[in-house]
Amino acid sequence: MNWTTVVNTYLAQRRQLGYTLESEGRLLLDYALFADKKKASQLSVSQALQWANHAPSGSRIAIARRFSILRPFSRYLCSMGLSSEVLPTKLIGPTHRRLPPFIFSDDDITQLMVLAESLIPIAGLRAISMRTLIGLLASTGLRPGEAVRLQRKAVNLKHGEINVLQSKGWRQRIVPLAPSTVRALQAYEAFRDNLTPVDQNGAFFLLDNGGSMNIQTADYAFRILRGKLGLSRQINGRAPRLYDLRHSFVCHRVLAWYKTGEDVNRLMPQLSRYLGHKKIGDTYWYLSIIPELMACVSERFSSCLQVQGDEL
């Protein structure tokens, strides 16, 4: 059996049904190369485990995830009359877990933005791009990937909004900006256009070579800043990430609502849509227990109990 041919046929059929299978497709093709090399005649549990254990990280979750990707493929093989065992569920363990995110304080964010100015080259476009990117993520809760992919035409500072065209879950969404964010982006535009007056690729965030910033360059620069701030050590299982600014935005937004006495339950659907979520449960996923938030929640709960006690 030529496993590469079988996997390509399987992926083509699934994609015709609307499944993208990008990362899954890459892993299945990796399995096909493995199986072809082994001259395997069937997909068995033992063979699937052997391939899954080649997960680069070696973590149990990564191994379980690789094994789970083969499960629907094993069912497909059986339905086509090809020799295969149907792989069992939960043989290894969970394929996902929620590691608590790091919630940046306002002071952390300010320090990161100041430290960004020390990136090499000093006073260069890379430094200012990172400073502005961090501020944008902290003030809007955009996903880092959405922010670095922004095109100039999608940033409408005259109307104070960003049109996110490549949004996860939605084709696009409009993100209103605070006046202070608009001013910061206007200052960045002026600085950027003074250094690179020629619009080479239409990207909003650029580097000193005129190329567009991508998630890899942004993550690398953030790791440098994280080290300078003394946050390189792992907290709750991993070091703080650029993506944690999105979690921080949600926590700070809800905290601000509690402090001003807003009806948080009524406003959560609005926050969910602002973040680009289709399900409000996805927004609650971003909430983390921080002391300030718990203090506000406890105070409001105590006030409710007091009111009920007075009514009785």
Image (cartoon, rainbow, N blue to C red):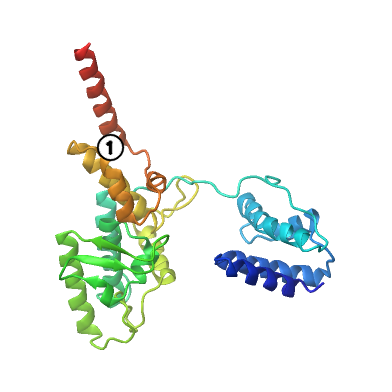
Amino acid type, mark 1: Glu
Crowdedness near tag 1: few (<14), some (14–19) or many (≥20) residues, C-alpha within 10 Å: few
Q: How many marks?
A: 1
Q: Is residue 226 visible?
A: yes
- Image position of 145 (left or right of 69): left
Residue 59 lies, with reference to residue 119, above or below; the image says above
Q: Residue at x 83, y 61 (%)?
A: 83
Q: Position of residue 194 (x, y in %)?
A: 19, 83
Q: Is residue 230 visible?
A: no
297 or 54: nearer the eye?
297
The N terminus - image quarter? bottom right
Quadrant of the rendered image containing residue 193:
bottom left
Query: Which residue lies most toward the top here?
Result: 312
- Image position of 5 (left or right of 40): left
Query: Which residue lies most toward the bottom here?
Result: 198
Q: Residue at x 29, y 59 (%)?
A: 112
- Image position of 64 (left or right of 167): right
Say which residue label 1 marks: 292
Quadrant of the rendered image containing residue 153:
bottom left
Q: Position of residue 291 (x, y in %)?
A: 31, 36
Quadrant of the rendered image containing residue 125:
bottom left
Determine whether the residue tagged by mark 1 lies in a helix, strand or loop: helix
257 or 243: nearer the eye?
257
Q: Position of residue 51 (x, y in %)?
A: 73, 61
The C terminus - image quarter? top left
148 or 283: nearer the eye?
283
Q: Position of residue 128 (x, y in %)?
A: 26, 71
